[in-house]
Image (cartoon, rainbow, N blue to C red):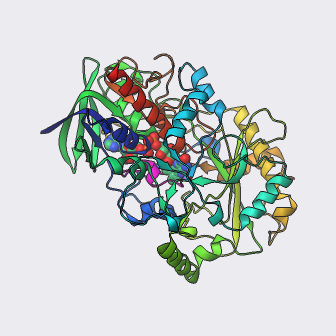
Amino acid sequence: MSQKEADFIIVGAGSAGCVLADKLTASGKYRVAILEAGPSDNRFWIRTPIGYGITYTDPKVNWCYSAEPDPALCDRTLYWPRGKVLGGSSSINAMVYHRGQARDYDDWERAGNPGWGYSTVRKIYESFEDLSPQKASSVSRSKGIPNETRLSVYDASADYHSLKDDFGRAFSEAGLVSPSAICLEGEGVGPYLITTRAGKRCSSATAFLHPATNRSNLEVFTNATVTRINLKERRASGVACRIAGKPVEFLARREVLLCAGVVNSPQLLQLSGIGPLDILATHGIQPILEHPHVGRHLQDHLGISYFYRANRPTLNNILRSWPGRIGAGIQYILQRSGPLSLSVNQIGGLARSQPGNDTIDTQLYCNPVSYQPVADDTRRLIQPDPYPGFIMGFNPCRPKSEGFIDIRSSDPFVAPRISTHYLATQEDLDGIVAMARLVGRIQDTEAIKDILANPPDLDLSSMDDDEILSDFRERATTVYHPCGTCRMGPGIQSAVVNADLEVFGIDGLRVVDASIFPNITSANINAPTIMVAHEAARRILKRLEA
Ligand SMILES: Cc1cc2nc3c(=O)[nH]c(=O)nc-3n(C[C@H](O)[C@H](O)[C@H](O)COP(=O)(O)OP(=O)(O)OC[C@H]3O[C@@H](n4cnc5c(N)ncnc54)[C@H](O)[C@@H]3O)c2cc1C
């Protein structure tokens, strides 16, 4: 069997792993090998923002997981896409960029994680966000890679569909707060920021990994699936991997950094004998250390869309018709602008479900496009409804319900069990009703009535609580923000990693990805995951240089 060696072995080149690969190789002092189960991201439908609708179900770049049937959702089985490609889920996501709200991180710190409060992490965000205005057509379209590794966070509002003005009027009629400048953090509804640069997706691979690949101390392995963390006397000594079907051992001179994401990081810990004893025993895995919280505390945003017919053209008219598609294609090729350069999620942000609420509890989405879900719970984003339509919807910011992820088998190629346990608390159920009523208030504004061709299918304001909840149970889906399955906390009694993201009881092993969130953040979680990786790199390097 072949063997390779590096100072750091990074497992998974997703939102977090790509950042670590950049930061840990920048000084030239340390050798890093990054192992990614999926292929290269050099694909047209990854680079082109609208390609989201294609990669969403493409098993070449997507793990295409399914959760267990959830009784709270009428026993429906939700589709759980996850990126399996350089850039991970940031290569297939909807590109909306939002930090969440200060309270999210202050709660992380209050849960026993010093240095993770908002006053600190805000500076980390500022260190990697490139918020400079850019016009797609004015940014160089050469092959050049920027010198600085920063994430491009683009204010695309000028390119958004004209329905944005109608949504804006509806928000102010409904008494919602507009953001003070841009929708970056905290309360405020308006145009979403997106992670694109010059009209192309700016994934974590684009922003951080690719600019680092010319360094001689970084090796990137694709189609390289890690099957186990090798442990010697409670120290991670490396990993076992399969590259194009062949076994390869990687030795870590310093640390193994697990960045395999919310599903696969707990899976790999359990496969390696670190997890709840009963789970290890069920699958005949020799326990190395009982770790009761590995795979527990799964949190996610569960959302719903309400569908409307418009009395004027929406993106449906462009994306559904051949002349519309050809026109949009030409605009994209010539100017890198137009609908193909954007996310389908254009307008929204964070709001209070009731005026005067002391918490910002609702994330809103208002999209100038509509696409009815198909039977298997996936969505055909490239085939919108055959009439002008739009969507308004919401997800609760901070649901309390928790599920879990456990291995189903000792075979690393068998997908783990995803048990979601959505809507398990009364607080979560009450929140759904309050937030649907908020959408009802927006739907009843003159601004929305002015753009409707027909009365809404659901009159949210006159539905009773049970009707709202039944509809939610029948139709709600994940908005793809699972986190928390290797959470950070003060000790092994309640968590998996400490505030430096080191696995309790095991030396030389950290988890750095969305699975370490102590609580879900209020909005989309790509930004917080990238922030976590920056802070992890800072802590790793600080320790080495102490
Ligand atoms: C369809 C979709 C839409 C989304 N939309 C948005 C959005 O608009 N805005 C937003 O902020 N967030 C969005 N998200 C969420 C966000 O992109 C993810 O939460 C974030 O990218 C997670 O980062 P991560 O580093 O934890 O994991 P990932 O980015 O998923 O990276 C994990 C990587 O590890 C690799 N890996 C796993 N197991 C192994 C193994 N055994 N060996 C080697 N490699 C392995 C995977 O292939 C993957 O590349 C979306 C997610 C999806 C799926």
Q: Is residue 374 above or below residue 324?
A: above
Residue plotted at (73% across, 46% down): 180
Image coordinates for residue 91, horizontal then vertical, percent = 44, 54
Taking depth in this image into account, of 538 and 530 the one nearest to the observer is 538
Q: Quadrant of residue 496?
A: top left
Q: Is any part of residue 89 visible from this angle?
A: yes
In the image, taking residue 426 as reference, residue 151 lies left or right, namely: left
Taking depth in this image into account, of 529 and 237 the one nearest to the observer is 529
**Span of residues in magenta:** 79-95
Q: Quadrant of residue 423?
A: top right
Magenta part mainly helix, strand or loop?
loop
Q: Quadrant of residue 338?
A: bottom right
Image coordinates for residue 293, horizontal then vertical, percent = 47, 24
Q: Residue furthest bottom?
A: 323
Residue plotted at (36% across, 21% down): 543
In the image, taking residue 79 as reference, residue 110 lies left or right, namely: right
Residue plotted at (36% across, 57% down): 41
Q: Is residue 427 magenta?
A: no
Give the number of callouts: 0
Q: Is any part of residue 416 visible from this angle?
A: no
Q: Is residue 249 above or below residue 83?
A: above
Q: Is residue 80 magenta?
A: yes
- For the C terminus, which image quadrant? top left
Image coordinates for residue 250, horizontal then vertical, percent = 21, 35
In the image, taking residue 245 as reference, residue 92 lies left or right, namely: right
Taking depth in this image into account, of 479 and 544 the one nearest to the observer is 544
